[in-house]
């Protein structure tokens, strides 16, 4: 039982902070960046590649650096702290994670090599209109004739789907189950409409009309793999949210100490200070769950990963709403403006909450099994 | 970063688990499990068995019966005790006056009191609060005036928990009325059988007799019973209230009650709303337990982790929320609180649910109310 980061992990945090934290130290830079397509800084993406961040979770033979979940979590947290819009979570952790988990060796080497090197942005096209956070695909279907596969149907919202150089698409297989396919988005039969999300991110509608797809790995049912990678993504989204919430709490306390009304600084009013104290409580509780869930991933116990991801997701969803809402309220009107950073953090926390399953979704999962165990022991 | 306990700590946990579930009488542990009231004898018996095996006061210095354990081991000891339904060592002895005497008392006081305090041969009461000195404890008015080699004590303490069992009481008394209020307070040990000490019961909303008023009228106390320096009592009181990082939140006990509540719930667990309430509470308790672990894992380097202040606040809120859930599970049966076992067909847990719920409202009031905890977080952590 040890909650401390080793020297190398600390160094990684410093390095990411030195690059990403510095790049977006001024919130205006982030505003400018997300105002134009592709919604992130391609130059910074290259520098992240050079630093090895984009290949962090992948094996060395696949072009990555073979780091573990703790390292990936550190990056996510630092990205969240400055609301960095680069698609680390969706491109590297999710889409890359699927290729790493399901691809053949030559697919992994090619796709992950290009991703790690910053030459290719990946997107995971999974959500379908009308569905809510499932592990499988239903309305997008895969059909084969001989060895060639084609996909049809609509995927939306696809994070960074318009900018992506390669899509990882989930599709219902002819004999049941859900397969994963690599799709070249510039090929015939693929139509993409990109747009901005409320938090400055990017998403797209991807319409597939007999579009060519290459099965990832053996092309069999990948539902379990998708579920696991989504769980890893959830825990990393939690880490990203922790960074964002820490920033919001710090920003709020600084503001209470400096903003004057009625001739005194706002921290003269206990009613406000107590609400800030409650934000701190929410943050620490969410941080404990997130750190623990990250360690469960690190311990590599697949049977516990899903539960850990749901537990962290419930805690972070609750905390994110509480802190995000209170941060705005305690700032007053200024936090309603797009120019001031605080409100945009709330927007991003709301996006993270709804990317891979919100608090109620995960509470429903936990509630379904609450009678199966007497008590929950995080140490065994 | 590592999730698992080390092999040594895991073995330690197993050893504690075995001890608590085999060496403490089953009938006492059953009472705790069923949330029935413990007698003085139950508490004394249990603490003496613990003490005999060096498990009553591990937080004390080793020469006075403590253990040289890491904070993590003390946490494990504390959690496993609650898990096994073992009554915790009397807090007034084990976590309050004992550590103060061990830290600040003279050699004579240590020899005289510490062994008996560890063994619960002396039952201590805490004489801090007064009718007009609650959260603002330093405004206390009970006086102690030196007359020859004795103090003469006059005043009133209140909220004295289990004072009806008390042999001795550790009091905060005003010894310098001229000084700034924190600087004129001393820490005095008083024999409750002394002439002039009167203990009167206060009935609480659950119908129980748990707290008392204690009156002091010209009570003569030997000067030797002063702990440490004259007028330095406030520092000792702060030490007493603030030195403990382990066991700040009742994690294990609350987890146990929630687990029991699943049994009480029976078919009600099929109801999605009830199941969601369980799931949410269980998850918050997990977050609390993990926060407690972060705190103990961190205090190894001496400095307490700032998150420790979260523990009292959130820990008592969850303890209360779980007791509220049990009342709701009991439903109409919760009205039968006045029925004896022979008068009622309703299960005992359901009949006890509301008195326990009402009683636990205290948890967010005493030991530094939750408003005071928020104040500490705002001031010392957030710098507000
Ligand atoms: C069951 C029980 C057992 C107890 N046992 C003992 C015992 O054995 N020995 C002992 O010495 N004491 C004991 N206490 C006393 C306990 O420590 C006090 O009740 C506690 O310190 C609060 O004081 P008070 O009740 O006078 O409330 P007050 O201090 O009058 O507080 C009233 C309300 O105002 C809030 N408040 C107070 N100050 C502030 C502030 N600065 N900012 C914001 N809000 C504030 C409080 O949180 C509370 O909500 C016990 C109390 C109870 C209920």
Image (cartoon, rainbow, N blue to C red):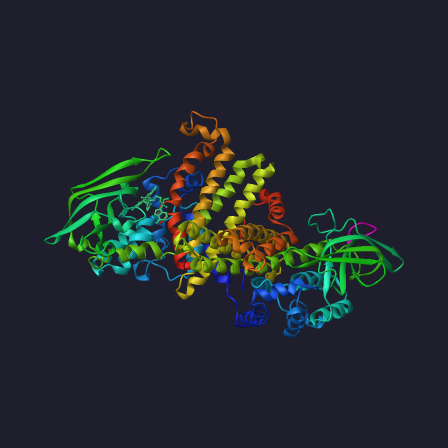
Which image quadrant shows ligand 1?
top left
Q: Residue at x 31, y 49 (%)?
A: B92
Q: Residue B51: image x %, image y %?
A: 34, 52
Q: Residue at x 74, y 49 (%)?
A: A129
Q: Residue A46: image x %, image y %?
A: 67, 72
Q: Residue A256's quadrant in the figure?
A: bottom left
Q: Residue furthest left?
A: B148
Q: Residue furthest top?
A: B343
The secondary structure that most of the magenta stretch takes on is loop
Query: Between residues B163 and A164, which one lies in front from this camera angle?
Result: A164
Q: Is residue A137 visible?
A: yes
State how many labels appear. Answer: 0
Q: Is residue A84 visible?
A: no
Q: In which quadrant will I find the C terminus of chain A?
A: bottom right
Q: Is residue A238 above or below residue B27?
A: below
Q: Residue furthest right?
A: A146
Query: Which residues, given as a range, are shown in magenta?
Result: A172-178
Please indicate whether residue A234 sits to the left or right of residue A268 in the image.
Answer: right
Query: Between residues B301 and A334, which one lies in front from this camera angle?
Result: A334
Check if residue B108 falls in the magenta segment.
no
């Amino acid at each position: 039982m040890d909650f401390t980061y080793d020297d190398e992990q600390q160094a990684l945090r410093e390095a990411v902070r030195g690059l990403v934290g510095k790049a977006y130290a001024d919130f205006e830079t982030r505003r400018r960046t997300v105002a134009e397509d592709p919604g992130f800084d391609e130059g910074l993406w290259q520098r992240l590649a050079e630093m090895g961040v984009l290949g962090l979770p992948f094996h060395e033979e696949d072009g990555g650096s073979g780091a573990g979940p703790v390292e990936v979590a550190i990056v996510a947290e630092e990205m969240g702290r400055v609301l960095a819009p680069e698609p680390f979570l969706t491109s590297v952790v999710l889409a890359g994670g699927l290729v790493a988990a399901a691809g053949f060796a030559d697919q992994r080497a090619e796709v992950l090599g290009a991703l790690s090197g910053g030459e290719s942005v990946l997107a995971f096209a999974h959500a379908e209109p009308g569905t809510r956070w499932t592990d499988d695909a239903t309305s997008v279907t895969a059909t084969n004739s001989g060895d060639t596969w084609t996909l049809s149907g609509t995927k939306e919202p696809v994070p960074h789907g318009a900018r992506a150089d390669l899509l990882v698409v989930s599709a219902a297989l002819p004999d049941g189950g859900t397969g994963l396919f690599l799709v070249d988005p510039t090929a015939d039969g693929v139509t993409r409409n990109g747009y901005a999300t409320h938090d400055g991110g990017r998403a797209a509608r991807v319409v597939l009309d007999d579009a060519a797809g290459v099965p990832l790995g053996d092309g069999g049912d990948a539902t379990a793999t998708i579920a696991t990678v989504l769980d890893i993504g959830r825990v990393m989204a939690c880490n990203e949210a922790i960074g964002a919430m820490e920033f919001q709490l710090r920003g709020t306390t600084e503001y209470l100490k400096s903003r004057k009304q009625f001739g005194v600084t706002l921290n003269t009013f206990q009613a406000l200070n107590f609400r800030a104290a409650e934000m701190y409580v929410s943050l620490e509780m969410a941080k404990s769950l997130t750190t623990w869930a990250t360690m469960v991933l690190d311990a590599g116990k697949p049977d516990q990963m899903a539960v850990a991801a749901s537990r962290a997701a419930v805690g972070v969803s609750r905390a994110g709403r509480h802190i995000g809402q209170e941060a705005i309220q305690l700032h007053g009107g200024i936090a309603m403006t797009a120019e001031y950073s605080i409100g945009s953090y709330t927007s991003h926390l709301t996006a993270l909450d709804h990317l891979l399953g919100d608090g109620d979704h995960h509470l429903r999962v936990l509630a379904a099994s609450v009678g199966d165990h007497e008590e929950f022991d995080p140490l065994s | 970063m590592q999730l698992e306990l080390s092999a040594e700590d895991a073995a330690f946990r197993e050893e504690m688990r075995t001890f608590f579930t085999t060496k403490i009488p089953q009938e006492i542990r059953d009472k705790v499990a069923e949330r029935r009231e413990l007698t003085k004898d139950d508490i004394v018996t249990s603490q003496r068995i613990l003490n005999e095996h060096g498990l009553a006061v591990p937080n004390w210095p080793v020469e006075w019966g403590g253990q040289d354990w890491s904070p993590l081991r003390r946490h494990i000891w504390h959690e496993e005790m609650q898990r096994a339904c073992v009554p915790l060592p009397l807090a007034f002895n084990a976590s309050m006056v004992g550590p103060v005497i061990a830290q600040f008392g003279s050699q004579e006081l240590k020899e005289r009191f510490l062994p008996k305090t560890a063994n619960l041969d002396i039952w201590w009461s805490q004489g801090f609060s007064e009718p007009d000195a609650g959260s603002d404890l330093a405004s206390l008015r009970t006086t102690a005036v030196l007359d020859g080699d004795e103090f003469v004590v006059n005043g009133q303490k209140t909220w004295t928990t289990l004072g009806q069992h008390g042999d001795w009481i550790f009091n905060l008394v005003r010894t310098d009325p001229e000084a700034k209020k924190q600087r004129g307070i001393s820490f005095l040990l008083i024999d409750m059988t002394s002439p002039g000490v009167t203990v009167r019961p206060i009935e609480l909303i659950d119908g129980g007799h748990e707290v008392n008023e204690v009156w002091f009228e010209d009570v003569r106390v030997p000067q030797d019973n002063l702990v440490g320096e004259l007028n330095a009592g406030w520092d000792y009181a702060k030490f007493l209230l603030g030195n403990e990082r382990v066991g700040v939140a009742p994690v294990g006990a609350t987890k146990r009650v929630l687990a029991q509540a699943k049994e009480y719930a029976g078919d009600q667990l099929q109801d999605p709303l009830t199941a969601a309430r369980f799931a949410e509470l269980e998850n918050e308790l997990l977050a609390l337990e993990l926060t407690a672990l972060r705190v103990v894992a961190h205090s190894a380097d001496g400095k307490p982790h700032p998150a420790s202040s979260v523990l009292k606040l959130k820990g008592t809120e969850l303890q209360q929320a779980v007791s509220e859930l049990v009342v709701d599970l009991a439903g109409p049966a919760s009205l039968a609180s006045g029925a004896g076992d022979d008068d009622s067909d309703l299960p005992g847990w359901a009949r006890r649910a509301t008195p326990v719920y009402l009683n636990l409202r205290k948890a967010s009031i005493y030991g530094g109310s939750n408003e005071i905890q928020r104040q500490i977080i705002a001031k010392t952590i957030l710098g507000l």
